[in-house]
Amino acid sequence: MRLPTCFKTLFRGLLLGCAMGMAGCVSAPDVPVKKAPPPVFPAPPAEARFVYERTLYSSADVVEEAASEGLRRMLVGGGRTGEGLGKPYGVAAYEGKVYVSDTAQRVVLVFDIPGKRFYRIGDDDPGGLMKPFGLDLDAQGNLYVVDGMARHIQVYSKDGKFLRTLGSAAHLRRPSGVAVDAAGKRVYVVDIGGIQTDEHKVIVFDAVDGKHLFDFGKRGTGDGEFNLPRDIAIGKDGLLYVVDGGNFRIQVFTPEGVYVRRFGAVGLRSGQFSKPKEIAIGEDGNVYVVDIAFGNFQIFNPQGQVLLAVGGRAETDGPARFMLPQGIAVDKDGRVYMADQYFRKVDVFRPAGLDENAGFAVPGARK
């Protein structure tokens, strides 16, 4: 008897389904998956100086998962979720706590790695933030935050308690970067200025009472002059290192604002700049400068000799891959933290000579 065409089609489908089902019962060979080694800089065969260690995307990267949540994921699948970064800008690090200003969420997000905690600073008044930019810390771990929209500096304890406000719109036009000396006596604020003003400068305040002390710099291309300055850091030599973005260089000054030297120039080669942004100083005195166009940070000695470049520009995310890098910090152990606005992350790099379980930024390290 001849079967109708529709039955033939159904029969063939059933046979195909059975075959696929049988095939699905076959065990796949147990082949171990090799995990790619973390990127190192410089690349082999040169001796490594920095190793990519981890990436911070959200609270899930530091907070331990509850047993109930782990069970739920086992049953329904899916990865961990947490409170993530919106638009990271500045970075600061103190004893394993990584502070990241977020201009989209209007807060500073804190990744407490050893404490396995995550919390926010600047949500509530007093001490609320409108548009946080640059960050810095004094020797006690007090946090100084530039609020670009409110045009002042907010100061918090290392645990996020609001302490005081420094500066005002009377002195600050477009503040972006901040540095405080280790003694917590002086605060230096970089003011970008704008295309219609010559007030491209650094403003200095008393860190305790907020008194305006003095300014230095103006718009120009000469020594001691600025064109759209971006950030500032205080070196181990006590000198001030200022990112002079529009002039594609780093300028160095005494604490009183007297010009000392400069390094860098516009270009595409190592040691040059295309679009420099933020700056940090390591415990060894070396200078770390982020460049958006290069998608990396370059390391210089205090005299301005380039030592190494870390990271690279990329259109897809991955370890040491950046599209819009912005903030940078170096902790006391030498770990480097760099934020990327496009990929909404902070990549962490460890000195090659530091064991992965050494230092502050280790989960559970704080007793």
Image: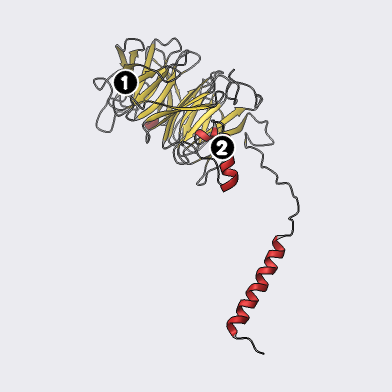
Q: In this view, does 119 lie to the left or right of 312?
A: left
Tell me the element at label 1: loop
Q: What residue type is labelled 2?
A: Ser
Task: Say the numbered circle drawn on residue 126.
Answer: 1
Residue sitting at 48 percent across and 33 percent down?
339
* Residue 154 versus residue 53 in the image, above or below: above
In front here: 275 or 34?
A: 34
Which quarter of the figure has residue 107?
Answer: top left
Q: How is the image coloured?
A: secondary structure
Name the residue tied to disc 2.
68
Query: Going by the image, does 1 lie left or right of 119?
Result: right
Q: Please, what secondary structure does the residue beneath circle 2 have?
A: helix
Answer few, some or many: residues within 10 Å of disc 1's Cα (few below 14, many 20 plus, some between 14 and 19).
few
Between the residue at mark 1 and the residue at mark 2, the CA separation in whole angstroms equals: 36 Å
User: Residue at left 45%, top 41%?
Assistant: 342
Name the residue nearer the viewer: 66 or 204: 66
